Amino acid sequence: MYESILDALRRGAADQALSAAEQALAADPQDATAHRLHAAALRLSGDREGAVAALDRAIGITPEDAQLYLERAGAQLDGRQLDEAQASLARAIGLDPNQFPAYIMKAQLAIVRGDLDEAERLGRTAARIAPEHPQVSTIEGVLALRRGDADRALAVLSHASTLAPDDPQVLHGLGFAYLAKGHLAFAEQAFTTLAERHPEQPTLQLLIADLLRLQQRFGDAADRIADLAGRDDAGFGVKRWAGELELDAGRPERALPLLRAAFDAHPYDPRTLNGIIAAWRSLDDADGAREALEGALARHPQAADLWRARLVLEPFGDTAALAVIDRWQQAMPGHIAALEARAAVHDQAGEHEQAVAIAHRIVELSPGDVRAEMRIVQDLAERDPDAAAERIERLIGMAVDPQVKRELRQMLGRSLDLADQPEAAAATWAELHAEVVDQRLPFNTVSKRGGGEWPALAPVADGTRGILLLWGAPGSRVERIGQVLGAVGAPLLIDRFGGQPPSDPLQRYGSVDELLSGALDPAFLVKMYRAALPARGVGDGPVFDWLLWWDNALLRAMRPYLSEALLLIAVRDPRDMLLDWLAYGSPTPYALPSPEQGARWLAQTLEQVADLHEGDLFPHKLVKLDETGDEPTAIAQVLADALRVQVSLPNGLSLPQRLPDGRWRQYAEPLAEAFALLAPVARRLGYPHS
């Protein structure tokens, strides 16, 4: 008599199952089985509350049936009624202590609640009833996963999956075990199998999309949740994420409608704003951006992020940008960001007094504002260095952030220098270096000078591409050569200073000792250097490589096997180099325990440069950056003279101001010991004694 209901349930035909169950109940309202099947049909149709009510009617007819309480707990779990489900499971166990599914469900509930010890106890009880059941292994595996033992979790859940490959709980646990081990493709497969059996669960689709994203398969991830994001009832977060995935997949035209829907719902959300701005830029849709932002500002005139985004759409300092800032200030009088935007425009126009006046206004509104205080101090440093030093010392006492304190102390050193207090300036800079010694690179060991005959310099073969090796010791301002080369379009490799440096021998300190001991064959060193170039993005053209360090021992490999290279070395008066290193650091972040220790190592390094130059040991050019000041054109001319090429700089290139050449003389007394160590090599490089 129940066959039509059961058949419809097996086929997933909720409407037919409901109709058949209602007919059975009309025939016999006291039939507990008919109420139970009616509950199953209601649950299939998504009516969880109706399913629980139908099971309650069945329990009213046969209150001793433990299976009814178990099914009631399942329906309550569907609705996330955890406490009610717990009570139903307890009743089921009370009626039948051998109700294995009840113990499993209670253990799962305990895991959800974070009570792992209780889950383990319930799992052991279930194991006594059915020790080989895959659900027992599932509980054990999930517990291991929650306790951080991903290896055991994966082993146990993999075994369970061989016993029950289609069990949703097993697949769920196995997917997360793979994820914990970083096996993203296997996790994706497990959750995809689970989603095929439960397509009504949107969270599974989101989880799979995230796994695809982690594998850099952005298009597949976006496609996975496209239907979900396109639904009218899709949440704001789903639409935003789908749009972001489309952007990552390089499909801004598909991203924009999704992000626009999210933006219209929450235009003040920073993440949504960043995403839709990226889409507008990719599509070059400035008009659409203006229209959308103006509409959002009309509804939310107090949203500062919207004003910032609107301002970005106009050329900096243009009359249109000024009009936006005016409107922003009218909508949000006294808002710090609006004032900062106005000050930036004044600075750009050379109206520095107005910019400083705004900085003072910001400090009145927000005492201790770091950027405003920095602008005020910058102005004071140019006009009244003593007053700047006093203000900075006061700010240091107020600052809480350690990084802000360091920046202020760095600025204090510069202000003390401008105030002609070299002893205090040197002491301030030395303290700053000493505090971070353990966070910087140690000095590379400098090989001993001499060491026998050099291998012959090989002739350069016809058609060999050129290789320019750029290097400069700390304080040489070699980075300025790098900036000029970059400005003129030279493909300068700077990856040795980044997060993913090459692993060739010119990167490793140990290569020097290995060369000298014979552990590293010179020919093999050069072979490894050449082999690493394609992975660094080098094509068939010339190589411009900025080296992290230099030692003349490398000539044992370069003279016979890399003779086509040209070594470009930046130098200045060694005493100015030490002072610059002390005040500004260096591109290679060496530790500087004290000026004296730095001077001793710098002298040894520059003695090698002098040996190289005096003995003409390798094709090279010394680029003396003295007298070039902070002028890019002067640096470009020095480069042009050294390389015998034309160097045309783009307009508008500027370099930050540094200590003037020859400034070391004002520090002759506080740094006397350090400068004495550098005096001999300074003479060898052609610099005067004093």
Image: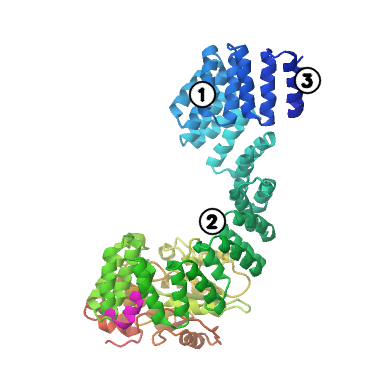
Of residues 43 and 396, the one nearer the viewer is 43
Kind of residue sitting beneath label 3 = Ser
C-alpha span from label 2 to label 1: 39 Å
> How many numbered marks, from 0 up?
3
Furthest-left residue in this view = 669
**Percent of width and height locating residue 503:** 50, 61
Kind of residue sitting beneath label 2 = Asp
Extent of the magenta region: 376-385
Residue 276 located left or right of residue 10: left
Q: Earlier in the sequence, mark 1 or mark 3?
A: 3
Q: Which residue is mark 2?
A: 269
Q: Earlier in the sequence, mark 2 or mark 1?
A: 1
Q: Which residue is mark 3?
A: 4
Residue 173 located left or right of residue 633: right
Residue 654 located left or right of residue 232: left
Question: Can residue 501 be seen by looking at this rendering?
Answer: no
Q: Secondary structure at mark 1?
A: helix
Q: Is residue 541 above or below residue 663?
A: above
* Marking on residue 495: none
For the C terminus, which image quadrant? Answer: bottom left
Q: Is residue 133 above or below residue 271?
A: above
For the N terminus, which image quadrant? Answer: top right
**Percent of width and height locating residue 29:** 70, 14
Q: Quadrant of residue 187?
A: top right
Q: Which residue is mark 1?
A: 86
**Percent of width and height locating residue 30:** 68, 12
Kind of residue sitting beneath label 1 = Gln
Q: Is residue 529 magenta?
A: no
Q: Secondary structure at mark 3?
A: helix
Say which residue appears at 37% left-offset and 82% top-offset: 572
- Of labels 2 and 1, the one closer to you: 2
